[in-house]
Image (tube, rainbow, N blue to C red):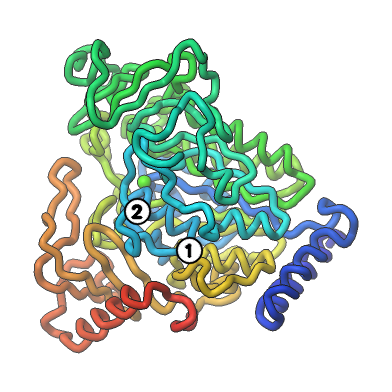
Amino acid sequence: MSGNRMKRREFVRTSLLGATLAPAVLIRRKALVSLFSSGSVGSDPPPNILLIYADDIGYGDLGCYGASGVRTPHVDRLAAEGIRFTSAYATSATCTPSRYSLLTGRYAFRDEKVRILAGDAGLLIEPGRKTLPAVLRQAGYMTGVVGKWHLGLGGGPGKLDWNGDIRPGPLEIGFDYAFLMPATGDRVPCVYVENHRVVNLDPADPITVSYKDPIPGLPTGVSHRDKLKMDWSHGHNMAVINGIGRIGYMSGGTSALWKDEEMAGEFTARAVSFIEKNKERPFFLYFATHDIHVPRVPHPRFVGKTKMGPRGDAIVEFDWSVGRLLETLDRLGLAANTLVILTSDNGPVLDDGYKDGAAEKVGDLRPSGPLRGGKYSAFDAGTREPFIVRWPDRVKPGLSDARFSQVDLFASLATLAGQPLDDEDAPDSLEMLDTLLGKSHLGRDHIIEQAGTLSIIRGRYKYIEPSDGPRMNVPTNIELGNDPRPQLYDIVDDIAEKHNIAGEHPEVVRELEALLKKIKRAGRTRRWIKPG
Ligand SMILES: [Ca+2]
């Protein structure tokens, strides 16, 4: 073992011990002393943290989780060298709420505003709210976000001038560097934003974005449907950019428009460059891929790699991105002391608005694995996700069935970095570092899942709150899990949530209903409930 490695271990031990025993101020000082006392951050670094956040990848979509018809050797390698979790959850069955919880340690259901955002929505995370990158930055980390944002930018709808300084955004809430797709691949504006500016924008061709009215004189997915390179199946028929219909209207910014085919390559290159630039210091990189969200338009070199059409090929492209990042860590000698976490924001969907053959060509692949439902659903496939943790210096490879929620990454990584949280910070995030690193197989006390309605899992039981919402999302053909009656499942013996046993266990229903009410009313989880 190298001297450096020993030092890193000591750093972590010191931080962990300190976080438990000493007052906040002392800890901060201790963490900074650990980082800076040797005169060079590079000579005594805590682990780098690389968080790979996939979009819409389901529990069964990756080779190491049993996928068939698509090979994911790089992700599988990560799993073989790390811990593969079988019971880890996003907080929500859709993008924006899961990402909000990940970065704030707070359940999205606590704030009405936290829902799938339009592409011109204002920044959802209020400057001043403690975020995961802010906490890590405080510990001396260089923090970066590359990829999909979808947490809003600027002051609100209609208030942001895309041609000027774009703020507030990630740089105002804790990131040192940002290279973003502002919202989603299927929403305008279809441009990249680097730090405060749209990339490659010609001032003579300014951008206009509208989520209300069409922009006169421009083609739409309806007026030019026969000329689209990928037809839409529902929605996605407003602006036409790169031959593809989108949600929302935009004009101008021609030189800045992205090419969907090049997006994974662009994001991956930026991520590699961030790692290279920060190899001498601890970094936190939040790498949020567009793959495998719609529109699925992988680079031509991935087209036809599966028999599943664009959805399968996008999984291959995602795996390629992961491989490039792992290769970069290897090349720079950073792999041993980099904590890599790979997961996804919500469950799988086949037809999510474009006729890309995903449903017709799925073959033997079961994107939800053994679980019921998918994206948007209260059933487990909505939120139960692939979740892999690798840190060669500290984590023994293996399998963990411990329940873990993405909302707990905040408090767990804060502890790892020696940064204790104030009571009001990350109110729903529990410190589960030992579980995350495989030292404990003790899972979270309970898991909350948000779809149209809320669910809570504790022990072997899962309770879904009664809801008058539709049972099916017809366009995507996904069971939403809504039912006007309470639902209770034994998700240990009935992982597919087939048998509602609420009538047989009214006492369990009452107990879980009461716990869920308590969590809602309390406005927080930490302080009144112990982890584990
Ligand atoms: Ca998503």
Name the residue at the bottom extreme: 507
Nearest the viewer among 408 and 191 is 191
Q: CA distance from mark 2 to mark 1?
A: 13 Å
Measuring 21% from the left and 14% from the top, which residue is drawn there? 224
Q: Amino acid at mark 2?
A: Val
Under circle 2, the secondary element is: loop
Nearest the viewer among 93 and 523 is 523
- Which residue was labeled with disc 1? 105
Q: Is residue 149 above or below residue 99?
A: above
> Can you tell which quarter of the image residue 452 is in?
bottom left
Task: Say few, some or many: other residues with alpha carbon within 10 Å of mark 2 (under 14 / 14 to 19 / 20 or more).
Answer: some
Q: How many marks?
A: 2
Q: Amino acid at mark 1?
A: Gly
- Which residue was labeled with disc 2? 114
Q: Is residue 205 above or below residue 480?
A: above
Measuring 47% from the left and 53% from the top, which residue is drawn there? 126
Q: Residue 133 at x, y = what percent?
A: 59, 54
Horizontal relation, residue 422 to residue 23: left or right: left
Mark before the other along the chain sequence, 2 or 1: 1
> Of circles 2 and 1, which is in front?
2
> Can you tell which quarter of the image residue 369 is in?
bottom left
Q: CB of mark 2 within 8 Å of CB of mark 1?
A: no
Measuring 59% from the left and 51% from the top, which residue is drawn there? 174
Q: Residue 265 at x, y = what percent?
A: 53, 28
Q: Residue 275 at x, y = what percent?
A: 68, 41
Measuring 64% from the left and 57% from the top, which residue is drawn there? 136
Q: Which quadrant: the N terminus?
A: bottom right
Q: For residue 448, say whether it is visible.
A: yes
